[in-house]
Every structure is written in structure tokens, then in C-alpha cells.
Image (tube, rainbow, N blue to C red):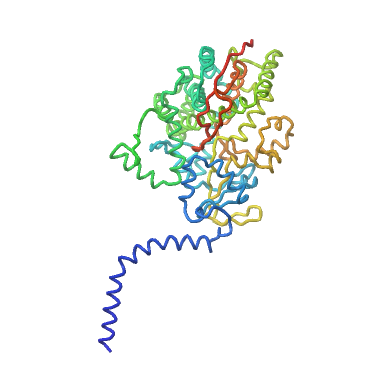
Amino acid sequence: MDNTLSSLTVLTKSLFYLLSPTLLPLLLFLLPLLYSGFAILAGPLRNIPGPFLAKHTKLWLVFITHKRMRHSHDLELHKKYGPVVRVGPNQLLLSYPSAVRMVYGSGTGKPLEKDSWYRMTPICQGLHYPHLLSELDINKYRLQRKQIGPIYSASSIAELDKPIDETLIKIMASMRRGAGSIVNLDIWCHMFGLDCLTAATFSKSTDLVVAGTDDGTITRHVQSWEYGHWMTHVPLLHKLNAFCMRFTGRYLWGAKVREGWTVFEVCYSVVSSYLSPSELPNLAAKLISLHHTNPFFTFRHVTEMAFSSLGAGTETIGITLSAVLCNIIQRPELQVKLQKEIDDACKEGRLTFSSEGIVKIGHSQIELKLLDATLRESMRLHPVAGVPFPRVVGKEGMMLEGLHIPGGTTVGVNPWVMGRSTELYGPDAEEFKPERWLSISRVERTKIDNYDQTFGVGLHSCPGKHLARAILYKILSMLLMHYTWHFEDANRERETECMFGVRWKDVKIMWSVRNVKT
């Protein structure tokens, strides 16, 4: 009997040692599949529809993001699966207007906590540039927003006419000389935005439009947004990149770390030169003054806000300006109406000019109703961000339109989807109709504003929205007052691509000079 037991023991051990080299890899392969299968068949999100692979792995979302079509892909997902779509093992995409209030805290709602995705947003081409968007501590965020509130208010922004006008006057002169030139719509509009923002921030413009070429700053800026756009989904890969760059100076895929300046580096070099408060009418001087009077607003906060103004601001103005111009050029009759509105307002003395041919901040928005409607409609159908901003449901869970979403689930609403909501904008929501804003009641506009993600919503709305709007109205009124716009090739198909922001892909435009008196 003892011999039999001994033999069985030896046989069992032999089989274990024989099979373990095979079993271990097999188990390592099967365990994730078993976990994934459990999540699909028995997990709390098992009944939420979505792409098959998305239920198994986050890599599906990484793949879709890296294809640069996230904005249009999310639209198709909702058309196929409905208002709640599963886009990851623990991630949902929402399209109910009520979700904006519950997730982001629009109106009087309380926002959900930010997802870890935000930790990666300061990463640009492997370098770390902190900004307000990446702040996860709600108390620190509230304090900083309260401190900078007066600086970014509409009345404070109105004081920036002079430095912006100086830049626009130079641009107008160069555009008259360059009439008939063909430019890349996206790059040119981003250069325009950066020129105006550096003037507003430092009283000194980068003058890229006047130079007539991108010196690499905008190209690097776009590359930085693209890097952060999909690297937020694979932070491990970013860490491996950082490791490789430390020892080789190259990314995993061989790209050089530095090939010019990003707007963040331009910003840091200039902000660092401000050692004392300045009398110049610009944002940096106001931020430095706040730093000297408020010990809690550190120099790090100064650079953070300057980074946000230039980085996010260039993206916002560049993409929005290109969207408006594209919509106007596609509709020659609209361009004629807008120019007539401006001409009539000039003749009737309803516009106030801060400089020759340049409208004072705030006046074009008040007097040029069709221009205001065109800008709003362009931002509705072509918002800057083409991705949802992910938030995490609290441990108690969340009820949305009768659906219980368990705690710990990551949720988000894509601005490209919400801007086309038939519940908010009617059955013609996908049509470009600026006139919808001319007939809308104040009550309806207030309702829509609560769901408008153009500049963020609720507590986390963009602090620089007044600055961006002011610059956009000044630029657009000037460009339409003095120039007529055309595509290089009106018959060419135009496409967009999403690298966090949604850009026009290789669209070429040109302008001719209008003979008008102001």
C-alpha cells in the first residue's frame, strides 16, 4: 500500500513538472480571456451594446483614436447602438443631453471626478507641461479659478485691444501685399491664433502670418496634441518612451525629441523673463501682478495659466477660425450677406473701431447678428474637441434616463455628438443653418447654453473663453470686411481628422482684397 502511494506521488510530481512549462503560458493566456468573458457575460455592463472587441480590451479604443477619426466614429457608434454605447471594458459613451448635466455639472449640477486620462494631458512630445485641465484636486482647481477670475473676465479682456490691434494691423498690410496667395487653411488659422494670443499675453507677437510661413512652431504644436491625444490611453507606452528618450534621445519609433519649439516652450521662455510686475496691458503682466500680491498664486501658477492661454487658446482659435471660414467659403451667398451686414453697420456708425479697420472688442458680437450666428453654428457643428472628456461615476452609481450605471464606470459625452442632438436642435440638427440662432428665444438659448460643450461646461468651463471669443470676433469682422475668400479648388473633397482637436486636412484657401472704407 505504501509503495502504491509513493508511486502515485512520484507520478503526480513528474506530471506537474512535465506540464508546468506548458501550463503556465497557457494559464497566462487564458486568465485574461476568462476575465474578459466574465465581464461580458456576468459584469454590470453586460447589457450595454457596443463593438464586440471594445467589450474585451481598451486596445480597441486606442486603435480607433490612433486612426484620427474619433469624432466621426463616435457619431456612427450612437447611430448604430443608441444613446449609451460601451467603448471599453469599463467605459461608456453617452449622448443624452441630460448626461452633460450629470457628468460635467452644467447648470447647478455637481461634476463627476476626472478620470486618470487627465493626468496625461500635460504631456506634449514626451515633455511635461502642467495646466489647469490636468488638475485633479477639485479644491485646488476651485481656488485657482477664483484667483484668476478677474483677469479673464470680459471687462478685463476688453483692455487687450491695443496689443491685439498692433498685430492685426501688421497682418492686414501683409495680406494686402499677399492677395491671391494660397495657404493651408488649418496651419494659417493656427498661425493667426498664435500671433494674436502672444500679443495679448506678452504684448509681443510671433508674427508668423506676416512672415508667411510656419517656422515649425505650429507643426510641433499639432504633433504635441496628436501625441497626447492617443498616449492618454496608453500611459505605459509613454513611460517607455520617456525611458528611451532619457538614454537615446529618441522615441520608441525613432522620432527625434526636439525639432523646433512648441508654443509651450515659447511660452516658458517668455514668462521666465518676467521678474517683476509690468505696466504693459497684457495677460502675463496681470498674472505676474497677481503673483506678487497673492502668495498662494505661485510662479508655477503663472506659467500654468500662460501655457493654458497659448496651448489651448491656439487650438481653439485656430480650429474655430478654420471652421467658420470653410463654412463661409462653401456658401458664397452667406459670405455676401455677412459682408453686407458689416458694410451697413459701418455706414450707419454702429461699429466702434479700436484701430483703423479693426472693430473694438465686444462691438462686433453686439452689432453683427449674422456673424454671431455664423460663429455659433460653426462651433456647434465643428467644436474644437473631437473626443469625450472622461469622468468616473461615484461609488454610489448614477441613474441616467432610467439606466443604472455602476460606480467606478468611466463615462463621457463627445461634443461632436451633442452638437448634433435632435433633442436640442430639432430634426435639422445636422444642417448648417445660422438663421436658427436669429429666431431662437432667450429661454431656448439659455437651455442650449447649459448643454453647450464648446468651452466646457459648469465649474470646468474654459477660463479663457472671453479672450477666445473676443479675438475670434475681431479677426472675423476684419477678414470679412477687407477680403473675399475662395477655395483653391472648389471641387476638391474636404476631409477632417481628429488629433484631440478636429482639423481640416490639407484644405487650401486664397483671398482677394475688397475696396471698402471704414
In the displayed structure image, the side of residue 300 where residue 319 appears, left or right = right
From this viewpoint, which residue is outermost toward the bottom? 1
The answer to whether 352 is drawn above or below residue 155 in the figure is: above
295 relative to 481, above or below? below
Above or below residue 217? Residue 129 is: below
Residue at the farthest front position = 491
Where does residue 483 sit, x and y in percent of width and height? 59, 17
Choose top left, top right, bottom left or bottom right for residue 466: top right
Q: Please name the residue shown 43% across and 29% down the image.
A: 219
Residue nearest the observer in this picture, 411 or 326: 326
x then y, percent, for residue 71 = 55, 40
User: Quadrant location of the C terminus?
Assistant: top right
Relative image position of residue 331 (x, y in whole percent) = 65, 26
Q: Residue at x 52, y 33 (%)?
A: 503
- 107, 43: nearer the viewer: 43
Number of numbered markers: 0
Name the residue: 62% across, 42% down. Answer: 418
Q: Quadrant of residue 24?
A: bottom left
Residue 173 is situated, as x and y percent measured from the top left of the image, at 52, 12
Q: Residue at x 52, y 44 (%)?
A: 138
Q: Where, quadrant-wise, is the N terminus in this rendering? A: bottom left
Name the one closer to the observer, 134 or 180. 180
Q: Is residue 228 left or right of residue 372?
A: left
